[in-house]
Image: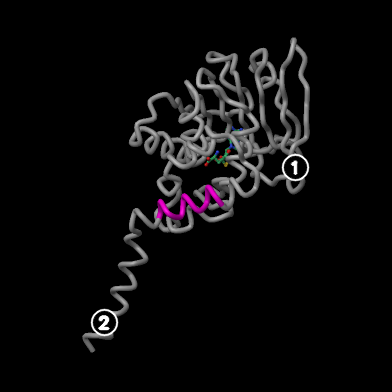
Amino acid sequence: MVRLLFIPKLLIITITALPAQNLSAARERMIQQQLINRGIRSRAVLDAMRKVERHRFVPAGLQHEAYNDYPLPIGEGQTISQPYIVAFMTEALNLKPTDKVLEIGTGSGYQAAVLAEICREVYTIEIAESLGLRAQQILKELGYTRVHVRIADGYYGWPEAAPFDAIIVTCSPANVPKPLEEQLAEGGRMIIPVGEDHVQELVLITRQNGKLKRQHRLPVRFVPMRSPGGRRY
Ligand code: SAH
C-alpha cells in the first residue's frame, strides 16, 4: 500500500519540478537541431536564444514543452512562435548593437527579450491588456530595463519613438500598415507576415535612399493583426 502511494508521488515530482539542467539541455538541443541544422548562422541570434530562458515566458504547465519545435498557447487565443521562426525573423533583421527596434505583438515577451539581448532599445506594443501586463512583469523580473511595453493598437506604431532601425511584426495584417512603413528609418529593415488567415508570407522590407524594397522570404502562419474592435486588419 505504501509503495503504491509512493510511486505516483515520485512521478508527480519529476513532472512538476523540472530540474534546471534538463531545461538548459533542452535549450541547447533546440539551438543545434532546430536553428543551426536549419541554417541559422548569426552568432548574435544564436547567443541570444541560448541565453534567454524561453520556459520563463510560457504558461507554467507547458514549461517542459518550451524548447519543442512548435508554437505554444500563451492565453487569449494567442501563441508564442516556434523557436525557428523567432530566430529566422530576428536574423532577417540583421541587427546591430546600436539599433532601436519596434515589435508589434508583444505576446509573451519572449521575442522582445531576444531582441533586447542584441540591440540597444526595444519598443513593443500589445493589444491584449492581460498579455501586455504579464509580459511587462516578466521582462521587469528578468531585468530587461531597455524593453518598453505599451498596451495599444500596434497598427499605428509608436510615432514618439520613431524612426526605428528595425521593425518586427508578429501578428499578420492583410497589407503592410502605412504608419509602420513611415516609421522605418533610412537603411531600416522590417519583417512582417502579410496575407490572409491561412496563407501568409514573411516579407522583408528595406528602406534605401528613401525607397522601400520588398522581398518574400518564407510562407508562414501567424495569428491575425486585429483592431481594438476585433476586426482583422
Ligand atoms: N512575439 C510574441 C508572439 C506574439 S503572438 C512572443 O514572443 O510571444 C501575436 C500577438 O499579437 C498576440 O499577443 C496578439 O494579441 C497581438 N496583436 C494582435 N493584433 C495586434 C495589434 N493590432 N497591435 C498589437 N498587438 C496585436
For this orientation, the residue located farthest to the bottom is 1
Q: Is residue 55 left or right of residue 92?
A: left
For residue 200, which numbered disc appears in the image?
1
Q: Please tell me whether residue 171 belongs to the stretch shown in magenta.
A: no
Badge 1: residue crowd in 10 Å (few <14, some 14–19, many ≥20): some
Which region of the structure is painted magenta?
Answer: 23-32
For residue 5, which numbered disc appears in the image?
2
Quadrant of the rendered image containing residue 173 = top right
Q: Is residue 220 above or below residue 169?
A: below
Q: Position of residue 212 (x, y in %)?
A: 76, 19
Q: Earlier in the sequence, mark 1 or mark 2?
A: 2
Quadrant of the rendered image containing residue 193 = top right
Q: Is residue 126 left or right of residue 15?
A: right
Q: Position of residue 25 (x, y in %)?
A: 43, 54
Q: Position of residue 197 (x, y in %)?
A: 73, 46
Q: Is residue 115 above or below residue 213?
A: below
For this orientation, the residue located farthest to the left is 2
Q: Is residue 35 above or below residue 185?
A: below
Residue at 78% x, 22% y is: 213
Q: Which amino acid type is shown beneath numbered disc 1?
A: Gln
Separation of disc 1 and disc 2 at Cα?
51 Å
Q: Which amino acid type is shown beneath numbered disc 2?
A: Leu
Q: Is residue 229 left or right of residue 161?
A: right
